Amino acid sequence: MDKAAQTMVDNLHKNTGKTLEQWIAIVKSQNITKHGEIIKFLKEKHLFTHGFANLVAHKTNQSDAGSATNKQDLIENQYKGKEHFKPIYHRLIAEIKSFGSDIEIAPKNSYVSLRRKKQFAILNPATKSRYEIGINLKGQEAKGKLEAEKPNSMCSHKIKLSDINEIDSETIHWIKSAYENAN
């Protein structure tokens, strides 16, 4: 379990007096399995915030990235129907690993998070025609390939790619800048 998820689990126990395992048992005793129904039950009957309800729903159904037994399966599932983007992923990972040995590569259900002390980028085969690199460079003006992301997004900027040949020195520069700022 990653650090952020563990903090949420710890706070769930602190805030409710029950452990994650106890909440999972409560949900299972209700014979509800649909994600939305679990969230509704926890919010209405136990006054959960959406974040905690979502955590318990995912853990109950083992549908979160942290419950996956094989992280490689998460990556494979991201590229189903988008296999033409796997060379982009592999090239970016090779470049990013050259920045240093302190990089955590954390596959999620729909993207791969890249962290140092904090998340600095995400790799996301967004659609069949667009690959996105989310980058955290708060305060950086959008210029060149670097586009501003919507407010309150996971990342402050993004770079859109459609072909491996679009990975150039500018692309790597922006990712490396985010990496350097994440220490």
Image (cartoon, helix red, strand yellow):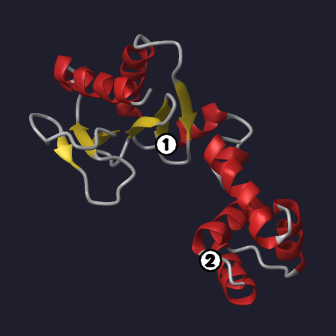
Q: CA distance from mark 2 to mark 1?
A: 23 Å
Sequence-wise, the earlier of marks 2 and 1 is 2
Q: Which circle marks residue 109 in the picture?
A: none
Q: Nearer the viewer, residue 148 or 94?
A: 148
Q: Quadrant of the C terminus?
A: top left
> Which residue is found at the position 49% from the left and 42% from the top?
78
Q: Amino acid at mark 2?
A: Gly
Residue 166, by quadrant, is top left
How many discs appear? 2
Across and down, in percent, residue 25 comes to: 89, 69
Across and down, in percent, residue 176 comes to: 31, 22
Q: Quadrant of the N terminus?
A: top right
Q: Nearer the viewer, residue 2 or 7?
A: 7
Q: Which residue is mark 1?
A: 78
Q: Horizontal placement of 68 versus 80: left or right? A: right
> Which residue is found at the position 69% from the left and 74% from the top?
34
Of tags 2 and 1, the one toward the viewer is 2
Across and down, in percent, residue 53 comes to: 67, 71
Q: Horizontal placement of 62 versus 26: left or right? A: left
Q: Horizontal placement of 14 versus 81: left or right? A: right
Q: Which circle marks residue 36 in the picture?
A: 2
Query: Which secondary structure lies at badge 1?
Result: helix
Query: Which secondary structure lies at badge 2?
Result: helix
Q: Amino acid at mark 1?
A: Gln
**Neighbour class for label 1 at 10 Å: few (<14), some, many (≥20)?**
many
> Which residue is found at the position 41% from the left and 28% from the top?
86
Q: Check the image and name the residue furthest to the left.
A: 144
Across and down, in percent, residue 122 comes to: 41, 38
Q: Is residue 68 above or below residue 166?
A: below
> Which residue is found at the position 86% from the left and 68% from the top?
18
